[in-house]
Image (cartoon, rainbow, N blue to C red):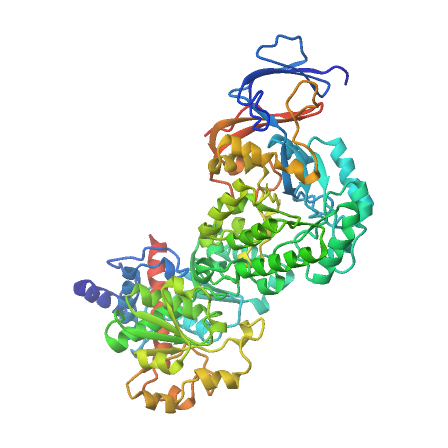
Amino acid sequence: MERKGRKRRRLCGGIADVDIVKVMSELSTRHLLGIKDLTAQDIHLIFDTADNFKEVINRPIKKVPSLRDITIANIFFENSTRTKLSFELAQKRLSADVINFSASQSSVKKGETLLDTVNNILSMKVDMVVMRHPNPGAPHFLSKHVDVSIVNAGDGAHEHPTQALLDTYSIREKFGKVEGRKVVIVGDILHSRVALSNIFALQRLGAEVKVCGPLSLMPKHLGDLGVEVETDLRKALDWCEVANMLRVQNERLDRSYFPSTREYAQQFGLTGELLREMDKELVIMHPGPINRGVEISSEVADSDQSIILDQVENGVAVRMAVIYLLASKIKK
Amino acid sequence: MDNVRILIKGAILVTPQQKKYHLKKRDLLLVNGQIKKIASKLDEKVDREIRLSNLHLSAGWFELGAGFGEPGHEDRETLSAGQHLAALSGFTQLVLLPDTAPVPDNRSAIRFFNDASKAGLTKIHPLGSLTVNREGKELAELYDMQQAGAVGFFDSGRSIESPSLLKIALQYSQSFGGTVFSLPIDSDLKGKGVVNEGKVSTQLGLKGIPVLAETTRIARDLHILAYSGGRLHIPGVSSAEGVKLIEQAKKQGLEVSCSTSLHHLIETDKSLEEFDTQFKVLPPLRTEKDRKALLKALAKGTIDYVQSDHSPRTPEEKQVEFDLAAYGTIALESVFGQLQREYDLEETIEILTRGYQFVSQETPKIEEGEPVNLSLFNPETNYTLQADQIESKSKNSLYVGKEHKGWSYGSILGDQMVLRETPPKN
C-alpha cells in the first residue's frame, strides 16, 4: 500500500503531469450516491487520494491540470453555500470546466421535471453532475435514467456522502485511524442526512457510534442500524472521544418537535462549562453552519478542541479526491 | 344473437364448494349464456369450440377493489379497456374504486358506471363517494346512489377525519343496509410519510408512516362501529397489528369486513431500497412479519377479501422523485399468478370467489341450467412478467420481473366471452 501511495503522490503532485493520473486502484462505483454503496476499501482509497490533494492545496500554486478535459455541472435544487463553494473550488483546483445551476434561476418553477432539466444540461456535453436535491433518492432516480457520473451533494434527509467522508477523514487525521473510535452525533438525527451518512461511514470504518438528542428528533428504528440512542448529553460525552454537533434544521421541521431553541440548548447545547466538567480531551466537530449559543457555545466552537475549520479545509481535499477518482472511471 | 352455441372441451372444473364436479374433467355446452349440458364427452354442432392446453374452469372471479380512471383520468385507463383487461385476467365481477374526477357522489355518476358496465364484459359494481366531492364534510346522497347500484361508499384515497361523520354515516346507512368504507390511515400520524416507518425508511431517509397510523385509525373506527352499529368495511389492511384488532372485533360480533391488497401479500418495504416508485403504494408495503400475518389471516378468513388495488398511473406520475410520485400499482393481470405462489389452487379459487358475499350473492354454480359465469385458466403456466406483456394501458406494475404461477385465458359472462389462447413465453 505504501508504495502505491507514494506513486500516486508523485503523479498528482507534479504540475507537469498533464494526463489524468493512472491510479493503482479504483472505486467500486461510478457514482457517489451514498456511503451505503461504498466499501471500506473505497473509503480508504478516497482518503489516500485526499492526502495527496491536501498537500496540493497547501502549495503556492494550488492547482493541478488533471481534469482539464472534464466538464462538471453543479445542480443545486436546494440552497447551499459552503457545500457548493467547496465543490466548485475542488473542481477548479483540478482544472475541470464548471457550470452552476440553481433552482432559483431555473425552469423547475415553470413545471419542468427533474429528468428534463438534467437531460437539457447533459445535452451540452457534461461529464459529471454534482446534485443537491430536497427529495431522498433523487440522485438514485437520476442515475437510472441518465448516462453520466453523479455525485450526491445531499438528498433530503437521506445522505450527504462527501460531508461524511470529510468528517471521517478529519477524525482519521486527528487520531491516525477511525477504527475503534467512539463518536457521538448530537442533535436532530431524524432530519439529518449528515447524521445518516456519518453513521454509515463510521460503522464501515469500524468506529462505534451513538446518537444523542431528544427522542422526538430520533428515528424510531435507529436501533435496527446498530446505533444506540442516548438522551443525556453528559453521559454521551462521558462515553465518547469525538462529539459531532449538528445544527437543528428548523427549515426541515414540518411541525414542532421541541418547545423552544432555548430549552433545546439547555439540554443539548455544548458549553465550555460542560466540557470542563468532562475533564478529558474531546474532539469537537460541526458540519456547519453553526448556531452559536444553541447546539454549541462560542467558547467551544473557537476552542483548541474544535476541529470545525479543519473540516472545512479537508472538505476541499476530499471532494477533489472523489471527483478525481470518479473522473478516472469516466476516462476508461 | 340467437342460439349462440359454445362447446368447451376437456376442462377441469375447480369448484371447491360443489363436490359433484370438483377437479373432474368435463365438456360443457353453453347456449345463449346458459350452461346447457355438462358431460364427460359431448359431441355437438356448435358455433365455437374451445380447446385449450390444460384448461381449468371455475366460477367467475370477483375483484374487490380496482380503479381505472374514467371519467377524468382516461390517460390512465378507460372504463372499457379496464373491463376488457379484467375479463382477460379472469374477473367477471369487479368493485370499482371511485378514483375518478369528478368523484361519483350522486345517482347520475353511478348510472354512468352502470351504463358502461352493460356495454362491457366484466360486471361493474360501482362504489359511490361517502361525502360530497370527497371533501369529508357533507354526506353524499347515499340511499339514492345505492338505489342506482352503488355497493358501498368510499372517499377513495382519503381518510375519514371526523369521527362524528363516520358515526353518522354508519347510523344513517343502516336503514338501507349500506356499507361504509374507511381507509385505515390516520392522516395526522401519517404526516408527510411515504413508506413504512422502519429500518428501511431510516436507511433511505424517507419519511415513514408508522403502523401506529393504521392501528389507531382501525381502533377508532371499531369503537365507533360498536357504538353506532352498521356495516363497516376496511380496505387494504397492511399490518399484523391491524389484523389483530379486526379479529378481536369480529369475535365480539361487530359487523366489520376487511380486505388486504395483493401487493401486501407479495412484497415488503425491502424492495424500496432502490427508490423504485413502482413500489410506492398506500398503505405502504410493510415488513415480512406483516406479510406473513396477512397471508395467514386471508387463508383463515379473518381478512375477508384480497383486492388487486389496481391503480393505473401514467409515466409522468411515476417517473419522478420518490416523494413526488403517485401511489399505486396495476395488478389485475397478476392476481392469479401471484396468489398461486402463496396458496394452492383450491385455496386460490376459494379466495378469488369470496367477493360474491360482499354484494350478498351466492357464488355462481357450474351446473346445468345455471347462467354462464366462468373463469378459464391454466394453473400450471409459469412465466416471468415482462413489461411488454402488460395489457393494461398504464404499465406501472410492481409485478414486472416476478415469477407468476398460473395464467388466465379469460372469462365468459352470459353471452360475452373474452379469450386469449397463447400463453406468455418464458
Residue A282 seen by the camera: yes
Q: Position of residue A176 (x, y in %)?
A: 23, 74
The residue depicted at 67 percent of the width and 56 percent of the height is B226
Q: Which is nearer the eye, B321 or A224? A: A224
Residue A65 seen by the camera: no
Q: Residue most toward the front?
A: B252
- Locate the N terminus of chain A by quadrant: bottom left
Q: Position of residue B249 (x, y in %)?
A: 60, 52
Apparent side of residue A191 relative to residue B115 in the rendered image (left or right): left
Q: Position of residue A225 (x, y in %)?
A: 38, 63
The residue depicted at 57 percent of the width and 58 percent of the height is B215
Q: Position of residue B1 (x, y in %)?
A: 77, 18
Check the image and report above or below for B212 versus B83.
below
Check the image and report above or below for A143 versus A280.
above
Q: Which is nearer the eye, A68 or B394? A: B394
Q: Which is nearer the eye, B351 or B394? A: B351
The residue depicted at 68 percent of the width and 61 percent of the height is B161
Quadrant location of residue B3?
A: top right
Quadrant location of residue A304?
A: bottom left
